[in-house]
Structures are given as C-alpha cells and as structure tokens.
Amino acid sequence: MQQPQAVDSKSRTAVLVCLDFGKDDGFAESIEEIVRLAESAGITRHVIVQGKRTRPDAALFAGSGKVQEIRDVVEELGAGTVIFNHHLSPVQERNLEKKLECGVMDRTRLILEIFAQRAKTHEGKLQVELAQMEYLSTRLVRGWTHLERQRGGIGLRGGPGETQLEIDRRLISQKIKSLKAELAKMRQRRDVQRRARSRKDVFSVSLVGYTNAGKSSLFNMLTQAKGYAADQLFATLDTTTRRVFLPEMGRSGSQVVVSDTVGFIRDLPTSLVAAFRATLEETVQADLLLHVVDSASPVRDMQMTEVNKVLAEIGADSVPQVLVYNKIDLANAGNGLPPGVERDEYGKIFRIRVSARTGAGLAGLRSAIAELAPGHLRSRGIAADPSTNPELA
C-alpha cells in the first residue's frame, strides 16, 4: 500500500480500492487507469489500497478485514470518498458507506462523473443525464434512508418512506422517457444530415479508439481544426465532424469528412454505450474507421480488443477498419518503426504509423485515405482525378 500524501482538500482526496481476483492479466495497468480516471474527475490526493480475493464478498465486496483497513486509511488521509475500481451492487455500496462513514462510488459512477464534467453540447449533456438517471434508478434506496424513521411501529413496513420511493421511481422513469424522446429527435435530425451527405457522395471517415489514444490531436492535425485535446481520459465526448481536402484526389478531394468520436475504455458502462448510441451512429454509418492506437501503451492489444467489443455492440464491426498506430515519437512505442504505411501480402493497407504530436506520418495517412476513398466515390459515379493518382489511371 502506498504512503498517504498530504491533504489539501477533503473533497479532492480519495482512497482507491483495487482488488485482484486473479482473472486480469493487466491488473497493474488497471491500477494506473483508475488513478488517471480519479485525476480526470478532480481528485488531487489519493492512496491506493490493494488486495487479493477469489471472489467478491456479497455484502461488502472487499470483506470485513479489508474494509477495516480501508476505513483506517480514510481516517489517516482525511479522505472524503472511497472509489472502487470495480462495479458495486446497490447493496454493497450502501453497506460500504455505513461501514466507512464516507461517500463510496464504483468505477461506473466515476466514469459517469467524468462524462458529466466534460459534456459541452446540449446533446452530450442529455446523453450523460440519461445514463445518470438509469444508474440512479437502481440505487434510489440510498437517497431515502432518512425516511426510515417515519415508518410506523413494530410489524409495520412501508409507510411514507415507501411512498416516497415509489414517487421518486415514477419521476425518474418519466425523466428517462423524456430524455430518450428528445435524443430520438436529435437522432432523426442527424439522420437527415447524414442522408444529405450521402446524396452529395461524401466519403465519411470516423476516428475511433481507446480513450487518450490521441484521436482528437490527430483529428486537429488532419482537419486543421482547433478542437479540445489534452493528455487526459475522455477529453472529448461530443462527436465533431469536419470536411477535409485531399489534393491527392483531385476534383473529388473535397468529398471527405472526418469525425472525432468519444473514446472507449474497458468495462465502459452499458448505460453510457446506450446513451451515446445516437452520437456513435456516425461510427456505424461511416465508410471507413481509423482505429487510433496508443502504440506506446504496454496493453495496446487489450485496448484494441476493448474498442472492437464496443464497435461490435453498436453494430460497427462490419465497417472497413485501418489501424493507426499513434505516438510513435515516444521512446517505448511498439516496434520502434518509422512513420509510414504498412501493407499486407496483397498490397492492402492495414496499418499506418504516425505521431499526432509531431506530425510525422501525417502525409502518409492522408494519402492512405485518398487511396481508400476513390473506389467508394467511383461506385457512386464520381471519378477521382487520374493525374493526381497514377494507380487510378
């Protein structure tokens, strides 16, 4: 266990609980990830409590002995929150709050908190609110423990407390219904815009990838946009689409749009995937996916697998995909190969090595998009200019 750090604000201090159940080969990396998630949520001081178990405890998840250890660290640090790097049931969360006498949140709620902080557009805020409402609907009892003393005498159950719970469930249910209806309208408008692009024979490219793989930085480099990009998890939540001009394609070089999408993460809450489905429709309807990979990450293969899982969940696994190995400028980047385009034995592009920070390999990426786009445009009756690409002559 790490030594407690100095405390500057109780609201910004937390104890991070990471338990190893022997099923995760990337346990060390998962600890690093929860630290970054906590920091992204505004936690400035933390202590990590680790442990090993064969399976979660039904009542406290971590077991009574480990919970007492966590409580000791909470008191020593003066922490205001305990964050579990796992999913907790409503009962486990409630029991832990009673034992620890402080706020408790699991990995799902932490990610929801980050999304709530980062959402900027109206649609993004609605999507996060929907996910929060669906998460809250399973934990209503936590908010109404003060009503227990309003109940009647021995043998009586229910009363005002139960009535309030029922009212609250109904209000949340109505709110969820209202949010889904509003998001459905936005989805319809997005569909109209997408059909308009389709009629104009636009080639659609979507950037997808694990959070913090550098999608937004790459998007800005490709499109000359000035979107927000930072070395933090979930820096971008709202899908942004920009037209990009590729002179390699001649007259049809302006018929390409690139979209930057929300990053994925392992154990991404199902409610978030569902809530952001409207935004992720850009991915499902794309003509080409550029799967951006942090080539310097020691667990990049696991991250690629997690991204492909979400793509399959939203029905985008059939969209043509090209790997883009980003951050090749870092010393520990995979293979240490220079920027460029890699092809398989049939000459088909399957991987492109770039650095969004330095711009290395960007020309190769643009040329690769231009090479992949003309076949699509020709199928719609638009021929790329052969003089700018001899392979098309």
Image (cartoon, helix red, strand yellow):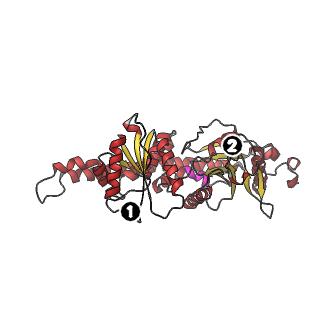
Query: How many labels, in total?
Result: 2
Dominant secondary structure, magenta: helix
Instruction: Indicate whether 317 appears above or below 147.
Output: below
Please give left or right for residue 306 compared with residue 175 in the image: right
Q: Which mark is residue 175?
A: none
Q: Position of residue 298 (x, y in %)?
A: 61, 54
Which amino acid, mark 1? Pro
User: Can residue 142 be seen in the rendering of this structure?
Assistant: yes
Percent x, y for residue 178?
Answer: 41, 48
Image spot of residue 176 (x, y percent): 40, 50
Decide: is 146 above or below 52: above
- The amino acid type of the residue labelled 2 equals Ala
The reply to whether the C-beta atoms of the residues labelled 1 and 2 are less than 8 Å apart is no
* CA–CA distance in space, label 1 to label 2: 41 Å
In the shown orientation, is residue 64 left or right of residue 361? left
SS class of the residue under badge 2?
loop
- Which residue bears the numbered disc 1? 56
**Residue denoted by label 2:** 356
Quarter that holds the C terminus: bottom right
Q: What are the residue bounds of the magenta stretch?
A: 279-283
* Residue at (65% x, 41% y) in the render: 217
Front residue of 362 and 327: 327
Residue 2 at x, y percent in the picture? 44, 47
Q: Nearer the viewer, residue 9 or 183?
A: 9
Residue 222 relative to residue 98: left or right: right
Examine the structure image and report whether residue 146 is included in the region drawn in magenta.
Answer: no
Foreground pick, 176 / 56? 56
Mark 1 or 2, closer to the camera: 1
Circle 1 sits in a helix, a strand or a loop, which is it? loop
Point out the residue furthest to the left here: 153
Residue that appears at 69% across and 43% down: 356
